[in-house]
Amino acid sequence: MADQENQQESGQPRTADDALGYEHARDALLEVVRQLETGGTSLEESLALWERGEQLAKVCQRWLDGARARLDAALAAEEAADQG
């Protein structure tokens, strides 16, 4: 039962990153990219940064997908009101 409560609608387990706002996740992702571009990290550190970047990119994408769904719903409601 606890596993079901820790699942998002997408079926993915919840992570600490899910609590991040879009702007915070985006800024953290930009920092990861900056660190990777700068170089000077070991292979292990680079892989950890890459994985972190992937996680943050997914958080950002979920925020953007949610925003798109809200916009689409609002536009559909407005269109329905105009036709009704």
Image (spheres, grey):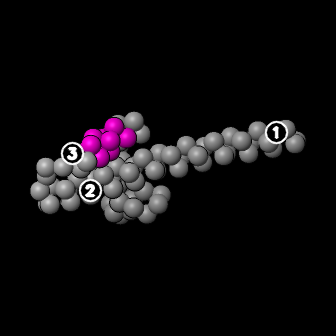
Image quarter of the C terminus: top right
Q: Give the labeled residue for mark 3.
A: 38
* Residue 78, horizontal then vertical, whole percent: 76, 38
Q: Which secondary structure, mark 3?
A: helix
- Mark 1 or mark 3, which has the lower sequence index? 3
Q: Residue 42 placed where, x, y %? A: 11, 56
Q: The disc labelled 3 sits on which kind of residue?
A: Thr
Residue nearest the viewer, comparing 44 with 40: 40
Q: Earlier in the sequence, mark 2 or mark 3?
A: 3
- Image side of residue 59 versus residue 46, left or right: right
Instruction: Label 2: state its secondary structure.
Output: helix
Q: Report if the CB atoms under discs 1 and 3 are less than 8 Å apart.
A: no
Percent position (x, y) of residue 7? Answer: 39, 59
The alpha-carbon separation of the residues under discs 1 and 3 comes to: 53 Å
**Element type at marker 1?**
helix
Span of residues in magenta: 26-34
Q: Label 1 sits on what residue type?
A: Ala
Find disc 2 in the rendering and name its residue: 50
Can residue 17 be seen at all in this image of the molecule?
no
